[in-house]
Amino acid sequence: MPKNKGKGGKNRKRGKNEAEDEKRELVFKEDGQEYAQDDKADVILKYQPDEARLLKAYGEVPDNVRLNEGIAGGMDDDEDGEGDDYIEFEDEDIDRI
């Protein structure tokens, strides 16, 4: 009968005591700050518009994901179509928002 060798191997045992000397101090919120958890995130240019539509059709992307197809149409200067009225923000505008 084979011996019981336990769970894991040398790589599991390797990092066992390495982080012991590098303890970090807890950082708590200060006055005027709040803890938050972001439920929604903007993913920009993760997929091309055609790829995103196909992934949504195949069910690889959740159904509640909204695809902004009008934005990609406004980037072309050659044709006039939907998405031509996009707004470009400067760094100062973003800081004020």
Image: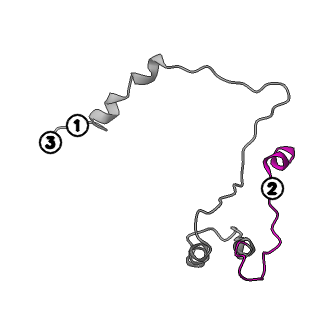
Tell me the residue that label 2 is attached to: 89
Q: Is residue 80 above or below residue 91?
A: below
Q: Is residue 5 above or below residue 63?
A: above
Element type at marker 3?
loop
Q: Residue furthest left?
A: 1
Q: Is residue 83 magenta?
A: yes
- Say which of 35 and 84 sits in front: 84
Binning the other alpha carbons within 10 Å of mark 1 as few (below 14), some (14 to 19) or many (20 upward) gives: few
Residue drawn where x is 71% and y is 52% of the image: 39
Quadrant of residue 69 within the rendered picture: bottom right
How far across and down, in percent of the image, does residue 22 sit?
A: 49, 19
Return the mark for residue 5: 1
Find the distance from the CA under tag 3 to the CA under tag 2: 67 Å
Q: Amino acid at mark 2?
A: Phe
Query: Quick check: 17 left or right of 9?
Result: right
Which segment did they paint magenta?
A: 75-97
Q: Is residue 55 above or below residue 13?
A: below
Residue drawn where x is 65% and y is 59% of the image: 43
Query: Quick check: 52 left or right of 10?
Result: right
Tag 3 near tag 1, CB within 8 Å: no
Q: Amino acid at mark 1?
A: Lys
Magenta region, mostly helix, strand or loop?
Answer: loop
- Say which of 26 and 8 sits in front: 26
Q: Earlier in the sequence, mark 1 or mark 2?
A: 1
- Say which of 50 and 72 sits in front: 72
Q: Is residue 82 magenta?
A: yes
Tell me the residue that label 3 is attached to: 2
